Image: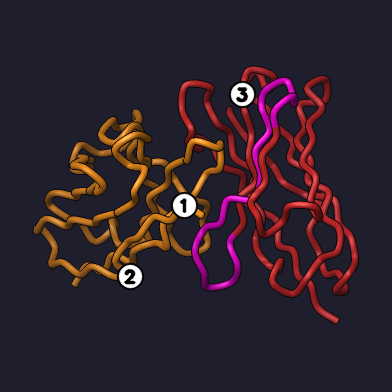
Chain colours: A orange, B red
């Protein structure tokens, strides 16, 4: 079955740039999406179609794609950005799939 | 406002059944695909099932295929998940989520309903 691979954790200091990667064989052919989930809350879509930002999402959140890897970049990280982040995509059979999630710690 | 509200979770014994519901409001439900996604305690997100806007196309994760059934009633603005032959590993918070037709992603999520499978 199709898998997306993320690092379990990323740590950054406030004001620095956080980069979270997600790798998957189908990513060159399928869009990737990113979600932010804070404790006790439902996930929130922060990036769609690899690099588009929904309305209401701060400009410091951006996405990029290169080959089989997509990257979520958070510039000027703030304490409120501490959360779990999940990438998500789909395969050609219609199955949706999530990465294992990355815990972002703001030091 | 746009809202999804799940209900129907609870405690059930292994082998038992449960039916989850998701009530949609604030948007034209019949224009959107819908999915169920779950999250076991302390674990990541797992997509469970998808249904197209008309209900004609349905997909399941391998982990639930043959045991779970997704359905929808566009007249009632509602999404359902019938869960049979439940196992301990089905214990999770179950979210319903909206999928715009131009995306394979989830732009609106409910608050989730907890399902616990235990004897």
Which quadrant would residue B33 be assigned to in this image? Answer: top right
- The answer to whether residue B48 is magenta is yes
Secondary structure under tag 3 reads loop
Circle 3 packing at 10 Å, graded few (<14), some (14-19), many (20+), is some
Do pointers 3 and 2 mark residues of a single chain? no
Q: Are marks 3 and 1 in contact (CB under 8 Å)?
A: no
Which chain does the numbered disc 3 sit on? B
Which chain does the numbered disc 2 sit on? A
Q: Which label was assigned to residue B32?
A: 3
Circle 1 packing at 10 Å, graded few (<14), some (14-19), many (20+), is some
Instruction: Give the labeled residue for mark 2.
Output: A8
Do pointers 3 and 1 mark residues of a single chain? no
> Camera-side residue: A95 or B113?
A95
Secondary structure under tag 2 reads loop
Q: Which label was assigned to residue A2?
A: 1
Q: Who comes first in sequence, dot 2 or dot 1?
A: 1
> Camera-side residue: B48 or A81?
B48
Which quadrant would residue B14 be assigned to in this image? Answer: bottom right
Query: How far across and down, in percent of the image, does residue B2 sit?
Result: 58, 29
């Amino acid at each position: 079955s199709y898998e997306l691979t993320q690092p379990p954790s990323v740590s950054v200091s406030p004001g620095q740039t956080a980069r979270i990667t997600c790798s998957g064989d189908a990513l060159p052919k399928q869009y990737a999406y990113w979600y932010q989930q804070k404790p006790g809350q439902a996930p929130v879509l922060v990036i769609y179609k690899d690099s588009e930002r929904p309305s209401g999402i701060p400009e410091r959140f951006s996405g990029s794609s290169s080959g089989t890897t997509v990257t979520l970049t958070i510039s000027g990280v703030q304490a409120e950005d501490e959360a779990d982040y999940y990438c998500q995509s789909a395969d050609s059979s219609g199955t949706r799939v999530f990465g294992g999630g990355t815990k972002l710690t703001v030091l | 406002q746009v809202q999804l509200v799940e209900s129907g979770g609870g405690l059930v014994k292994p082998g038992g059944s449960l039916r989850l519901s998701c009530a949609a409001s604030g948007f034209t439900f019949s224009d959107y695909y819908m999915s169920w996604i779950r999250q076991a305690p302390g674990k990541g997100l797992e997509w469970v099932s998808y249904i197209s806007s008309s209900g004609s196309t349905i997909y399941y994760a391998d982990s639930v295929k043959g045991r779970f059934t997704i359905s929808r009633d566009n007249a009632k603005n509602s999404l359902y998940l019938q869960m049979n032959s439940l196992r301990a590993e089905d214990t999770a918070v179950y979210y319903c989520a909206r999928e715009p037709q131009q995306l394979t992603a989830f732009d609106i999520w409910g608050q989730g309903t907890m399902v616990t499978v235990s004897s």
